[in-house]
Image (cartoon, coloured by chain):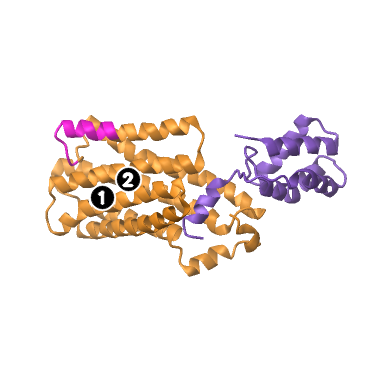
Amino acid sequence: MENAVLFELLAGVVYLVAGVRLAVLARRTRAIPEALLTAAFLCLGLSYMFYNIPLMQGSEPVWSTFTGRLLAALGIGFLPFFTLRVFRGKAAWAKLLAGANVLLLVVGISLAVLNGDFEGYTVSAPWFWLEWCGYMLPYVWIASEAFLAYSSARKRKRIGLTSAMVTNRYLLWGLYGVLGMAANCVTLAMYRAYEATQVWQAEWDVGFGGLEMLSIAMMWLVFFPPRFYRRWIGGQDADPAAAGGG
Amino acid sequence: MSTELFDQAAEELARQTDWTLLTARGTLRIAMKAGGVEPNGVGSRELRAVVEQLMPRELELRGIGEPELVCAALIERVGDVVSDRSSSDSDEVFRRLAGD
């Protein structure tokens, strides 16, 4: 459990750092996608803190877990709006999908609270699945759109319309989506085992922690690409100046 | 979403090649797809890149002699149409995300 808590705290710190950086960017550009991602990342970062700081001290108060749960739902609830805005700005089906995702989260959590389930670990309850789908759908959508965009950007890269870095960022964002999906599946297994035994199982903790580490790596490469990585990926541009426009 | 620039380019291509508008639109669409560019809301920079780099081959495949001349004429007529549109606005967002 300790490793998972450490990995999750680290993930929370990365979300918060990325969120603050995006907030600075959003203030400068006044653009909605950055603002949406800022809100999502700050909520997710804080959520990790509420879940894990008490665990570090050996306790798990319900108020803290519930606050973490609400912040996670809020943060993940912003993600489909980012996807909508960036990839499907005017599509009616995409607006409906983003709205439906909010509904899944709101109804799922409301039903859980009305039935006294503040922690959200009750896999056997029907409302759990509404909430779980609300956490899963944004990552499925992120992965689908990012991989489609990656495929199209590879073609644009060949004729100098986009850069290798941007093309690679789509791939990383798609992988972030896949890791989010995998983490949701592991969470499901983790909660199922917890519901049966009332003990967090170490193997699922390790699996979840590993996925968190990979997610952190993807986010780091998207938002804070190190110089060596920029040189490596950027070196694939046939004409870096031509691709600079984006 | 506007397809104004795409429509203009297809009409000009039909004029230059004596093709029907349907053939011209189809050929232009194929070239754009190969370049990862959406006809809906295509920008002038994207259109120019597709016409310069991908259209000559498409025209040659369809038996048009001197495709470079056709492409040059196409660019001259519609390549400089001012358009701030882009079918890949997501590129701009993903460029900004890392502070590029």
**Residue on which disc 2 sits:** A75
Q: Position of residue A154 (x, y in %)?
A: 59, 51
Q: Which residues are magenta?
A: A106-119
| Type of amino acid at the residue the image marks with label 2 | Gly
Q: Who's the residue at 42% across and 54% down the image?
A: A27
* Colour purple maps to chain: B
Q: Which chain is indicated by disc 1?
A: A
Q: Is residue A178 visible?
A: no
Residue placed under numbered mark 1 in the picture: A47
In contact (CB < 8 Å): disc 2 and disc 1: yes
Magenta segment: does it hold A114? yes
Q: Quadrant of the C terminus of chain A?
A: bottom right
Q: Which chain is orange?
A: A
Q: Secondary structure at mark 2?
A: helix
Front-most of A125 and B15? B15
In the image, residue A85 sits, relative to residue A169, either above or below, namely above
Q: Is residue B35 left or right of residue A16?
A: right
Residue A95 screen position, x and y as percent: 44, 33
Which quadrant holds the N terminus of chain A?
Answer: bottom left
